[in-house]
Image (tube, helix red, strand yellow):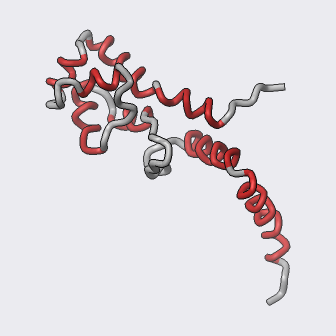
Amino acid sequence: MPTQTSPTSACKSRHGALRQVVASRLNELGINPFEAARRGDLERSFVNDILIGKKHSVRTDKIGSLARALQIDPAELILSQSTPHGHRRPVAAVESVDTVLDHVCNWLAEHPRATCALVCAVALIPLMMDVPR
């Protein structure tokens, strides 16, 4: 039987993704975080803050600068970001279908009553379609 991943562990595994992408690109380019910040015209500590875990996400207006500094597709940075609990950002426009499904499954796992209501409503749709008006 396959092991099941809890919603919180799935979320925790995404917290270091941005840091990993940035660290990997710095290593590939052979530059330090302060040089990357200079290349992207960012604050001196900006990239280092990502590496030490002080920043878990990058504001939309900084994505292009960071991507330019790391010579990377901005989409890769967007997809690697975690969001603070309670902060919502549109996921469908920037995330893969698998990632969106992960978000939905995690939410359903965290809200069992809503999940039950949703399952019942979906099960009733075919019955409602057959009812004459």
Q: Is residue 74 above or below residue 51?
A: below
Residue 33 versus residue 26: which sits nearer the camera? Answer: 33
Residue 47 place in picture, x, y as percent: 27, 24
Quarter holding the N terminus? top right
Q: Quadrant of the C terminus?
A: bottom right
Depth check: 40 or 10 in front?
10
Total marks placed:
0
Q: Quadrant of residue 18?
A: top left
Q: Residue at x 55, y 27 (%)?
A: 13
Q: Please say if 121 is above or below 103.
A: below
| Residue at x-position 81% and y-position 76% | 128
In which image quadrant can residue 45 be found? top left
* Residue at image point 75% right, 56% down: 113
**Residue 115 figure quarter:** bottom right
* Position of residue 34 measured from the top left corner of the image (x, y, whole percent): 19, 18
Give the percent coordinates (x, y) of residue 32. Answer: 23, 13
Q: Along the horizontal axis of the image, is 59 left or right of 125?
A: left
Q: Residue furthest bottom?
A: 133
The spot of residue 15 in percent (x, y) is: 48, 29
Q: Is 45 placed above or below 73 here?
A: above
Horizontal relation, residue 73 to residue 119: left or right: left
